[in-house]
Amino acid sequence: VPKGPGKGIGIDKDQFYKAQDMYYKMAGWDEKTGNPTEETLKKLKLDWLLN
């Protein structure tokens, strides 16, 4: 953040993408596409979306 009360606060891109991958994994989403995995859709009884 370049200005204001949060000036100088932030994370680098590597930290961001690592956190994003961890979040996707915890949510049951594919880390490359960000879409729910087949397993997640089945758990949520949304497997009809797979067809």
Image (tube, rainbow, N blue to C red):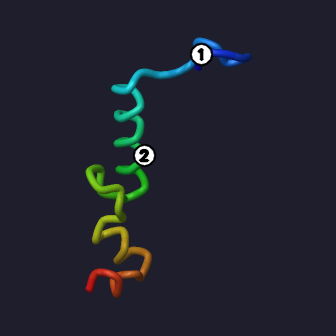
The quadrant in which the N terminus is found is top right
- Residue at the spot of label 2: 23
Give left or right: position of 32 versus 34. Answer: left
Q: Which mark is residue 31?
A: none
The residue positioned 30% from the left and 69% from the top of the image is 39
* Residue 29 relative to residue 6: left or right: left
Distance between mark 2 and mark 1 Cα atoms: 27 Å
| Crowd band around label 2 with a 10 angstrom C-alpha radius: few (<14), some (14–19), many (20+) | some
- Mark 2 and mark 1 lie on one chain; the one further toward the N terminus is 1
The residue lying furthest to the top in this view is 8
Which residue is depicted at the point 34% across and 42% down?
A: 21
Q: Position of residue 24 (x, y in %)?
A: 38, 50
Compared to residue 45, the image places residue 32 above or below, namely above
Q: Residue at x 35, y 62 (%)?
A: 35
Name the spot of residue 9 as percent of width and height, x first: 58, 17
Q: Is residue 38 positioned above or below 29 on the image?
A: below
- The quarter of the image holding the C terminus is bottom left
Question: In this figure, which residue is indicated by the disc labeled 1?
Answer: 2
Between 33 and 42, the one lying in front of the other is 33
Callout 2: helix, strand or loop? helix
The image position of residue 8, as x and y in percent, is 58, 12
